[in-house]
Image: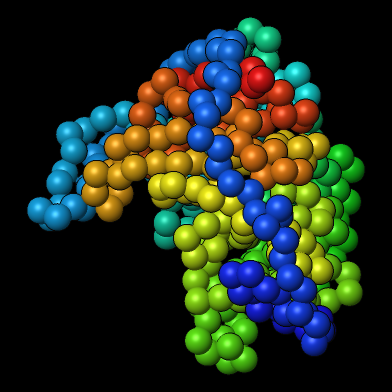
Amino acid sequence: MEVPVKFRPQFLKRSGRVVLLLMSSVGVVIAQKLPPPTRMWSVGPLAKSEPVMGIAFGAKGATVTAPHVDSQTGSIFAATRSVVFAGDRIVLASMVGMRKVEGAQVPEQVYQLLSLDTKTGEVDLKDDGSFDYHATGHKFGRVQNVSPDGSTLGNETSPGFELVDSRTLKATQLTASPSVDTSVSSRGFVTDNVRWIRDYPKDLGFVTYTDATGEHLLYHSKCGGRPQFLSNDLVLEPGCKSPLIVDTRGNLVRTLSVKGDFSFAGVSQDSKRFALQVAKFSGMHSIKQERFIIYSVDTGEPIAEVTPEELAEGQSWTAFSSDGSMFVVGSPLKLTLYRLP
């Protein structure tokens, strides 16, 4: 097992050695205005969503909003997994209702898959195959994450975890231990599981990386969030107040300076660009302002900023094209494609 690493504001301690972190490794958000993206097209509504009622919690208590069409943007999880670039298409999965299943006590959610032409926004859909976890002898399977380069899916087999080739759909077991991933690469997965808390009782944030060689504790601190791969070697950790980029050996690569509440919003398949949602809230869950800052993975500097045409309930759906030149943002109600500078 790899020796755990403890990050400090200016020093990194690893294997008995103390390495001074150069100030040049700290990414700072520049003050000048970022170049605007070019709007390509906007389409919607794309699917018939069900009406819902919202509840916002603020200083004056709970506030119930009037019935409205569900934009499906209340979840950070859905925001980064519901829309994706696939070649010259943009594919999204929109929840359109519920249905009863024989023998099940709880109804299952029904999703509609839509495929849009990147150039025009025209809707079309073609079936390209499916993955059956029963074929590998498992009673359970759950695929929630894909590697930044799009080559690998992570499948929780409960117990166990396997990597699935997204092109051949061939699965390779990585571990037989019960595992829940927050992000996957083509080599392994990371999790924010707090099982290390016995070794570090004062910490609540942990990043554990599992690959073919075993488990490696990359980061632990008094706080943290859901770690996300930016490449096979780099991981974004939300940190306490500022997001951190660490590598899979446990080294701190860069700290970003972000003003406001932020969350992960996607990475390009070439691992050159990634996005953060920066938002302001009027209550605990009611969003007041939303924008997306596009960063360079290599330098940690912002290179563009995108503001959605419609305000989301929680976090708008987002995805990069494979080379990071385009960025799609929105929901099934309205989806907009931008070309980035």
Give the image location of residue 154, x and y in percent. Answer: 74, 56
Residue nearest the viewer, comparing 188 with 52: 188
Image-quadrant location for residue 178 = bottom right
- Identify which residue is drawn at 30% across, 44% down: 281
Q: Is residue 74 above or below residue 331?
A: below
| Frontmost residue, 66 versus 233 | 233
Please determine whether, in this image, residue 214 is positioned above or below residue 116: below
Residue 309's x, y, as percent? 42, 20
Residue 53: horizontal and vertical position, in percent? 24, 39
Quadrant in which the N terminus appears: bottom right
Q: Depth check: give the residue in front, 150 or 122.
A: 150
Residue at 83%, 44% (x, y): give it.
Answer: 151
Query: Does 238 sit left or right of 260 as displayed?
Result: right
Residue at position x 41%, y 47% from top? 260
Q: Residue at x 62, y 26 (%)?
A: 327
* Residue 237 visible here: yes
- Give the answer, above or below, for where 70 lies relative to 244: above
The quadrant of the rendering that contains the C terminus is: top right
Position of 96 with respect to 192 (left or right) is: left
The image shows residue 186 at horizontal and vertical percentages of: 84, 53
Q: Is residue 65 left or right of residue 82?
A: left
